[in-house]
Amino acid sequence: MVTMVERSTGRVKFVVAEGLPIIIINELVINHIDGPVIAYTDEYGVYNGLSELSVIVDHRRVNHSEGIFADGDAHINAAEGIHSRLRIFLRIHRGPNRENLQFYVSFFAFYHNNGLIWLEKIIWACFNKRKSAKDICEANA
């Protein structure tokens, strides 16, 4: 799973993928990021190709294996904090199977991104017969 967090707004997007080779990470970034952006990651090798993408103006890393968790504004604390909340959410649902995982994490992102009005947005969309709950969650994640 890849987690993308917009630092200025705190909005999050989760993408569930089978395996994470560099080419998949690059494709996800190109398809889900409105650039130009500065990418903050840990030292995991799948992020090696990010600096070559045109939407990435700078790629800053923190090396957890060397005990570095933040270096000025280079950190991934927002993503790690959201992941701890996501793990609790998934545990409550007894760990959904892989087939449904994208729906669950998209719903969590919708809930996170919309704050206190998340339920109001879903009810409005359902009464107006705009979209299904699955479409709403995935579009607003």
Image (spheres, rainbow, N blue to C red):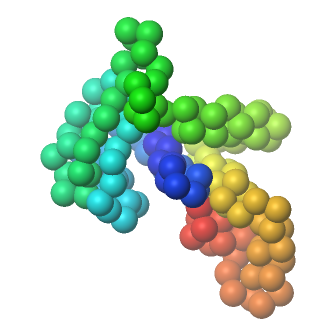
Give the x, y percent position of residue 133. Answer: 72, 70
From the viewer's perspective, is residue 49 above or below residue 13?
above
Q: Quadrant of the C terminus?
A: bottom right
Quick one: which residue is furthest to the bottom in this view? 128
- The residue positioned 78% from the left and 66% from the top of the image is 118
Give the x, y percent position of residue 140. Answer: 60, 68
**Left or right: where 89 falls relative to 21:** right
Residue 62 quadrant:
top left
Quick one: which residue is furthest to the front in this view? 72
Q: Is residue 103 visible?
A: no
From the viewer's perspective, is residue 75 above or below residue 15?
above
- The residue positioned 37% from the left and 19% from the top of the image is 63
From the viewer's perspective, is residue 24 above or below residue 126?
above
Residue 31 quadrant:
bottom left
- The residue positioned 50% from the left and 44% from the top of the image is 3
Quick one: 20 or 59, which is closer to the camera? 59
Give the x, y percent position of residue 14. Answer: 53, 50
Quick one: 18 or 60, which is closer to the camera? 60
Residue 112 quadrant:
bottom right
